[in-house]
Image (cartoon, grey):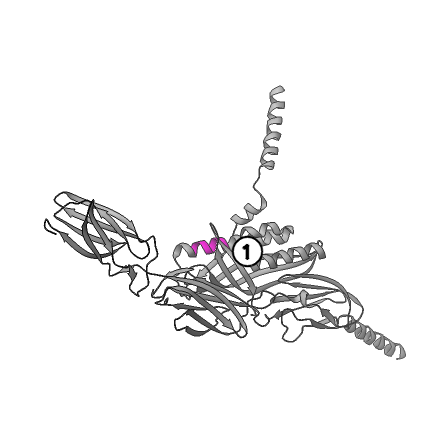
Amino acid sequence: MIRRVVFVLVVLAMCWFAEDAAAAGIKPPASPVAGQGMSLETSGSGSATFYLVGPATRLKRSIHLGEPIRLQPREVAAAGRYTAIVDGDGGTSVSFYVAPGKPAELSFLARPSRVPAATQHGISGVVFPFDRDQNLVLEPLPVRFELTVAGGAPESRTVETRHGVAYIILDSGRKEGAAQFVATVGDVTARRVVRQVAADPCDLHFQAERAKDGILVRTAPVRDCSGNPVPDGTIVSFVQVGPHGKDTVDARVKRGVAQATLPANVPSTISVASGVVSGNEVHMGGGQ
Amino acid sequence: MTRRLLTAVSAVALLVGLLAFRPAASVTAADSAPAITLDPGKAGPRELEEQTQRSIVRDYGRAWNTLQAALDGNDDELLQQYFVGVAKDKLAQAVAEQRKSGLRLHYQPRGHALQVLFYSPEGSAIEARDTAELEIQVLDGGKVVHRERLTQPYLVLFTPAEDRWKVRLLEPLPK
């Protein structure tokens, strides 16, 4: 009888210690955030090897089971899935997700760097918010976009991020100049400059008069449809057609106007064009 | 006898030549892509052209092969072929930590299902969600300390380079 009791006790003891030996366990932190120190709870007893594998982490450390494992901020700086492994005393593993931190930096793509004034859907802005450890922040965030040209009314809109990105498409302003394109998330701001330049010439007009060595043609100040002067260097073409044939003379806009001297062929019809835009015509007859 | 000797020497020379001029590991890796599907359905605001879809599938497969080769060989130089920016920096850090710790993570992708989420208006960024079927092994020296088969979603950001799309962000997502 006693022998049986001793046998049962021995078996129970073996089971007890076997249970203890297999009790190596590891518990991940609750709601861990990238770049913040954290602890993993362990259970069991004795020594073991701890491994941590994450997006940018490969960690190997000797630990004592039953004591917490402390992780430094730099060891869990990348957001993503981590696998913690305990090798020894039964061995176990657990996986957990480390979330990105708060936005600290904006990746702001503003296109294009130069855009004609008054262009519909001419400017786009795309924002990706990152935390201080370069993790894309995935929770929805309001992004305020603002486009301003000196002397003009700012245009602003707020767009919420989705999958870590927010974008906007805007018309360029009517006034030429350096437009400040600003994106803001909370207290984080990114600035870009979009240069708004005069668009194609609009309402081209010129005058012609006889000169000593031919016909002098001269445009009125060349402007786009919003009234912005086109940049110097813009090509303006004068075309002269008559019984003699056809002559074309290209002139560059200089200080707002373009001028040229055509051959003194009369009668003839002279027209003006710049790019795809054409202007008025002038007929030069024998008496004009 | 002399002919036999010459034949044997020629055969050995041919074998040595073939071994010497076999393709580099990275090229081989880049040419055997895992199975990848792409769903462009939710792309926007820019339309994702068919040619771009094909390029993304090709380049993402090669990026994963490059990643495997870099992690298996602890060679972060390979990464620059298909990774750039944050993705390259983090993976290079992983390789550096592997060298330091003696640990190694081996990926065996079984397939990738890409769903395009965003294609920027001017065409300079594509964002996609990849549902990856992976088999991973964690090795300490030659010993496998962990083995797992899992479905892991990733957020991937592609940006265009000279002749390919490079991965700028490869961020694991919660399931």
Label 1 Cα neighbours within 10 Å, binned few <14 / some 14-19 / many ≥20: many
Please provide percent x and percent y for residue A122.
37, 64
Q: Residue at x 42, y 73 (%)?
A: A156
Identify which residue, A126 or B130, lies in the foreground: A126
Q: Is residue A90 left or right of residue B160?
A: right
Q: Which residues are magenta?
A: B53-59
The amino acid beneath tag 1 is Val
Judged from this view, the residue extending furthest toward the front is A212
Q: Is residue A287 visible?
A: yes
Q: Chain of mark 1?
A: B
Please provide percent x and percent y for residue A265.
15, 45
Judged from this view, the residue extending furthest toward the left is A287
Asked where in the image residue A53 lies, by quadrant, the reply is bottom right
Callout 1 secondary element? loop
Quadrant for the N terminus of chain A, please. Answer: bottom right
Residue at the spot of label 1:
B84
Q: Residue at x 67, y 55 (%)?
A: B96
Is residue A4 located in the magenta-colored stretch of the structure? no
Asked where in the image residue A197 lies, by quadrant, the reply is bottom left
Please provide percent x and percent y for residue B89.
60, 58
Q: Residue at x 22, y 52 (%)?
A: A217
Identify which residue, A202 or A51, lies in the foreground: A202
Our reading of the magenta stretch's main secondary structure is: helix
Vertical arrangement, residue B51 with respect to residue A62, above or below: above
Q: Is residue A108 left or right of residue A101?
A: left
Vertical arrangement, residue B96 with respect to residue B14, above or below: below
Identify which residue, A19 or A225, lies in the foreground: A225
